[in-house]
């Protein structure tokens, strides 16, 4: 009974859980590359942040396309269109991240780590929502697909 409930819950939230899993790696890439650019290469804060964002966005596109939303889009033009949408929405979340950091640190006086945690959470929610609903919308699981997967899981 409990095993069945866990299986149903996992199947229902599989896309979100997979997104969160790969998001942890993306966050790690972002932090490490920012540190390398800022502290090893001695680039400016803005340059380091943009460089880290670029690498993280490329990683995010590859993992979201292949591992999370399992895009079936083919052809250079169509994949390029997915990339442009993906990067554009990531740019929007970068703006939200930056505004959150400014508001919470400069205006409200929060500690930078708390502010960055909140900013990352807001960006992650924006990124998941836009990826699922706009960029990779044709690959989203429909309610019927989830129902079929649940039935197949029960029969195993």
Image (spheres, rainbow, N blue to C red):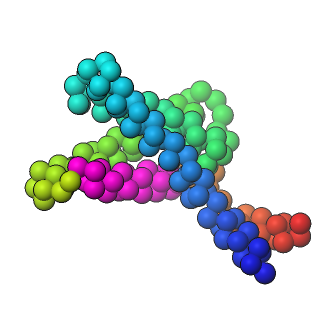
Left or right of 83 in this view: 17 = right
Q: Which is more toward the observer, 34 or 64?
A: 34
Q: Which residues are magenta?
A: 112-133
**In the image, what residue occupies the spot 59% across and 58% down?**
17
Which residue occupies the extreme right position in the image?
156
- Say whether residue 98 is left or right of residue 79: left
The quadrant the N terminus occupies is: bottom right
Q: Position of residue 33 (x, y in %)?
A: 40, 30
Locate residue 88, reporting x and y percent: 38, 40
Q: Residue at x 20, y 54 (%)?
A: 111
Q: Main secondary structure of the magenta part?
A: helix
> Observer-nearest residue: 37 or 103?
37
Q: Say which quadrant the C terminus sits in.
A: bottom right
With respect to residue 74, does 119 lie above or below? below
Q: Position of residue 143 (x, y in %)?
A: 67, 68
Compared to 4, does 108 lie above or below?
above
Residue 129 in magenta stretch: yes
Residue 65 quadrant: top right
With respect to residue 55, does 71 lie above or below? below
């Amino acid at each position: 009974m409990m095993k069945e409930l866990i299986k149903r819950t996992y199947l229902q939230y599989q896309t979100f859980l997979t997104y969160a899993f790969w998001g942890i790696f993306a966050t790690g890439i972002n932090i490490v590359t920012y540190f390398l650019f800022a502290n090893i290469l001695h680039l400016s804060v803005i340059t380091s942040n943009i460089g880290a964002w670029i690498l993280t966005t490329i990683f995010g596109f590859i993992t979201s396309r292949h591992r999370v939303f399992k895009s079936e889009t083919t052809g250079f033009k169509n994949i390029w269109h997915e990339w442009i949408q993906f990067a554009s929405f990531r740019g929007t979340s970068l703006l939200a991240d930056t505004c959150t950091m400014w508001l919470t640190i400069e205006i409200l006086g929060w500690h930078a780590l708390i502010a960055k945690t909140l900013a990352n959470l807001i960006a992650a929610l924006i990124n998941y929502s836009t990826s699922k609903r706009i960029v990779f919308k044709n690959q989203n699981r429909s309610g019927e697909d989830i129902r079929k997967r649940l039935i197949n899981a029960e029969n195993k």
